[in-house]
Each structure stands twice: as structure tokens, then as C-alpha cells.
Image (cartoon, rainbow, N blue to C red):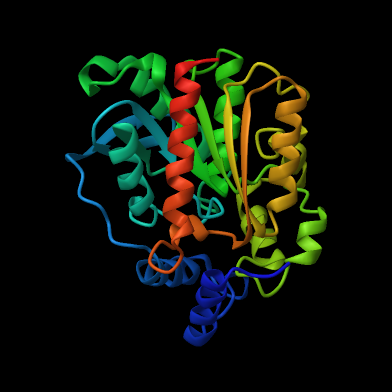
Amino acid sequence: MKLDPDALRVLEIGRAAGGEPFETGSVAAARAAYNASFPTLQGEREPVATTLEQQIDGPNGPIALRIHRGIGAPQTGAHGGGWVIGNLDSHDEICRLLANLVGAVVCPDYRLAPEHKFPAGLEDCLATLRFMAENAADLGIDKARIGVAGDSAGGNLAAVLALLARDGLVPPLAAQILIYPNTDARQTSDSYRLFGEGFGLTAATMAWFRDHYVRTPDDIMDWRVSPLLAPDLAGVTPAFVALAGCDILADEGAAYAARLQAEGVPVILRQWPGQIHGFVSMGRHIPAARQAVAEATAAWRQFDKGP
């Protein structure tokens, strides 16, 4: 598959910068390298109406939240980063843009592996959703119009939250926005073979992320780690699924969208054939990043209106 010229430019920037693959060093080194790299890829951070930093209580201790308010409807998002790297700043560009498009974004700084393995990060996201629903009036949001959003590992968490909401374990959701989500921790799809090297996120790095996240290999088959393996997807909230064509996660994201559709869930599937994993966080060099967020927002509004 031919790479988009913007994506190729980003890969060239990465090669020129050098640096070792995450999996060859320590977690601390990977986080430091990622934190140093993402500002060179993100676009300018949009001004928003207000930003509030807040802490809430969670099952494993305090959870830091960043709440951006724009105008209109609410949204809650989880950041990506393979469950190991990433923070509130690494995805602040996307969250600010979403806030201006949908009205408000609540971003939880969920606990990261390997210090906090599955299901700690998921539990932090669950606590954030419950906090939003229970404090909707104080937050100035409509608890009937809360959605979940995330990219990569955040997309995994968003998909799982939607399933838990369907089952009544967290408040109901209005939409799920899944951007190149992790849905199958077995990591055996054809896209791992096709794009496992030379397209940014490698198969070796993805295995390193997963192995830090799970407690034992048995967790790989737990649908809360691999939502594609959930026995039933019917009844979950409508989904917008965005995929990058040159991405090791492309096949499992497409398979998840196909299962949702087959089981009666409204789905808007959008694919960017020549893009690489993470492109939505590369707005400085990839204009399609902003387009993807805008299309996700349009889908959210369509779901919000109902059939």
C-alpha cells in the first residue's frame, strides 16, 4: 500500500531523529523519548473557553482530570500510548479540538503499566465516567449525552467502556469514537505481517506494550483486553471507527467495526488508506489529522440525534 506523502515525511523525521526502539530500553526511557517527540508532531494547541485541572477519587487512588470546555455537548476521552506511555499533554491537541467541536472534553490521566497493570487503567476510566454522571449538574453537562473516545490503547479502553455501559456497569453512553483501536491482543492479524516494520509502530513495540499491560498471558483472551473476543457486541452505543491503512492495528479495527455492524450496532467506518498509526496526533505535518477529528465529531452529532 502506498504511503501518504505526509505520513512518509513523518517517518523520515523519525528516522532522522534516531533513537532506540522502545522495547530495547526501559519504560522510563520510552516515556522520556515519547514526551520529547510528540511536541514536534502535534499541531498548535487551540485555545478553549476554559481548562480545569481536577482530582477525583478512584479505586486505586486519586485520578487527575483535565476538563476543557468549548461550546455545545459533552464528550469524555481516554488518551493512547499502548497503556504504557502517554499523558494528558500528549493528547491535549486532540482534546482541545474536540472541546471546541463538541462542547466539553474530560480527559482522565489513567494509571499506566507496568506499574499499574490491567485492569487499573480501565478502572480509572470507569471511575471517571461515574464521576461525570454523578456530578453532571456541577460540570454543566447532560449525563444523557456522554460519549467515550480514544485512540490506540485509548480506543481499546473506550470500546470496553461501551460494552460495560451496555451491561449497566457504568452510566449509559451516547457514542463511542474509536481511532485505530487495539481490539485483539493476540496480535496475529495480517496487518502485523504487512506493516510490522517501517511504518512507525512496529509489531515488536506493540508486543512490548501488551506484555507490560497484561498480568499473565491469560489476560490476552479476556475481552476487557481484547474486545474483539467479547461474546456479544449487540446493544452497545453507536460507533465511529477511524483506521489508518498502513497500520499494524488496521485489520483488528476493521474486524471490530464489521462485528459491530453484523450485530446491529450503527457504525460509521472511515479509513485513511495511506496513513500510519498515530496520524491523528501528528497535526503539524499531517492535515488529515484535523479531518479525522472533524469527521468523528460529525458522527457523534449524528448519533446524538438518533436514527
In the foreground, 19 or 1: 1
In the foreground, 238 or 2: 2
- Left or right for 250, reference 152: right
State the quadrant of the N terminus: bottom right
Q: Measured from the top left, where is residue 17 in percent x and y?
A: 47, 84
Q: Measured from the top left, where is residue 223 in percent x and y?
A: 71, 33
Residue 184 can be seen in this image? no
Q: Does residue 282 lie above or below 36 as drawn?
A: above
Residue 95 can be seen in this image? yes
- Left or right for 290, reference 225: left
State the quadrant of the C terminus: top right
Q: Measured from the top left, where is residue 297 in percent x and y?
A: 43, 36
Q: Does residue 58 lie above or below 179 as drawn?
A: above
Instruction: Please tell me which residue is depicted at 48% across the width and 41% down the height of the picture.
Output: 295
Q: Quadrant of residue 21?
A: bottom right
In the foreground, 8 or 122: 8
Instruction: Please tell me which residue is depicted at 78% across the width and 65% down the height of the picture.
Output: 194
Q: Does residue 31 lie above or below 55 as drawn?
A: below
Instruction: Please tell me which residue is depicted at 58% across the width and 30% down the height of the picture.
Output: 239
Q: Measured from the top left, where is residue 228 in percent x and y?
A: 74, 36
In the foreground, 25 or 306: 306
Q: Quadrant of residue 107?
A: top left
Q: Does residue 234 lie above or below 215 as drawn?
A: above
- Total labels: the figure holds 0
